Amino acid sequence: MRTFERSATPSTMSFPASAEASPVPPHPVSAALVAALDHEFADPALLVDALTHRSWCAENEGVSNERLEFLGDAVLGLVIAERTYCDRPDLPEGQLAKIRASVVSAPALAATARGIGLGDALRLGRGELFGGGTDKESILADALEAVIGAVHLDAGLDAARALIGRLFGDLVDRSTILPGGHDYKTRLQELVARRGEPAPRYEVTDDGPDHDKRFHAVVVVVGRRHGPATGTSKKRAEQAAALLACTFLENAGVEDSEAVASRPSSGFVPVSASLTHPSSPAIS
């Protein structure tokens, strides 16, 4: 397997063997996130970089996750394209592109990031932190792609492919069955219609200044409320909420998102520690 060397310039985010020389204290990451990633980093500083937003770097020394996000976006697109190409030899290029778009989209990435508790592990500047940055769609989506890029650099394409399979396998499978299913509002409406239930009802609120307004949507369907989901527009927020509802309805026996959200935290571990975790099967 081809290996990649990091820059010879020492990173301020690295964790040297000597505790006295470490310029950055261990960064807390939830045990749930560690288990979801199921990857033990040979270089824990890569994960720290992936979790570091540029707003944090404006107030502290460090490396933002923008370069890793650029790499992770390409790796994610490649792996999803490869999987759909192999799984659906009957589909033309246009349909394959729609499937990829349904996964490599900000709402889908942000929903996946929320599902693994990524927002709580982000390093944000004070403005973003107090402005709800831990749940902002664009920040979550970029950070998840950065994590994928970090895994790719740390252990290669096979490790990144396994991570993407764990995080996006179910979504890819659903999108493969329903090409173009990135229009989650339409998909949700069709699901509800087949069940003979009333049409979904969306509740949207907004906050923030006009130049940086955020919209929060909840969808009420089949007697349940799903959300809130956040987006930079009303349409994006509604699509993200519909994605949550679709995921719940299409996975019989899966717990309500509100019940999952109400659970107490399972604790934190520092990323500079050995990231040990139970093994979980990859979705191939």
Image: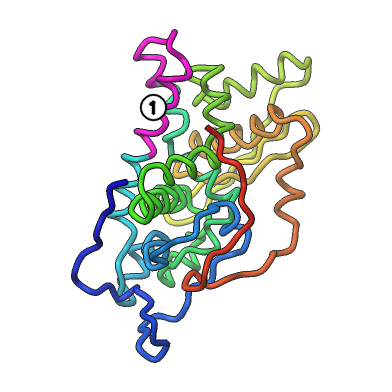
Q: Is residue 209 left or right of residue 258?
A: left
Q: Residue 196 appears at what percent x and percent y? A: 78, 15
Seen in the picture, residue 284 relative to 138 is either above or below; the reply is above
Q: Is residue 201 left or right of residue 216?
A: right
Seen in the picture, residue 97 relative to 28 is either above or below; the reply is above
Q: Which residue is mark 1?
A: 82
> Tag 1: residue type?
Glu
Q: Is residue 140 left or right of residue 191?
A: left
Q: Secondary structure at mark 1?
A: helix
**Magenta-highlighted residues:** 76-97
Indicate whether residue 96 is drawn in magenta.
yes
Q: Nearer the viewer, residue 257 or 97?
A: 97
**Number of numbered discs overlaid on the protein picture:** 1
- Quadrant of the rendered image containing residue 161: top left
Residue at image coords 57%, 20%: 186
Q: Residue 153 appears at what percent x and percent y? A: 33, 53
Residue at image coords 43%, 56%: 209
Residue at image coords 52%, 28%: 172
Seen in the picture, residue 166 relative to 121 is either above or below; the reply is above
Q: Residue 123 appears at what percent x and percent y? A: 44, 67
Q: Nearer the viewer, residue 207 or 167?
A: 167
Residue at image coords 43%, 72%: 126
Packing grade of label 1 (10 A; few <14, some 14-19, many >=20) is few
Indicate whether residue 150 is drawn in magenta.
no
Seen in the picture, residue 112 relative to 119 is either above or below; the reply is above
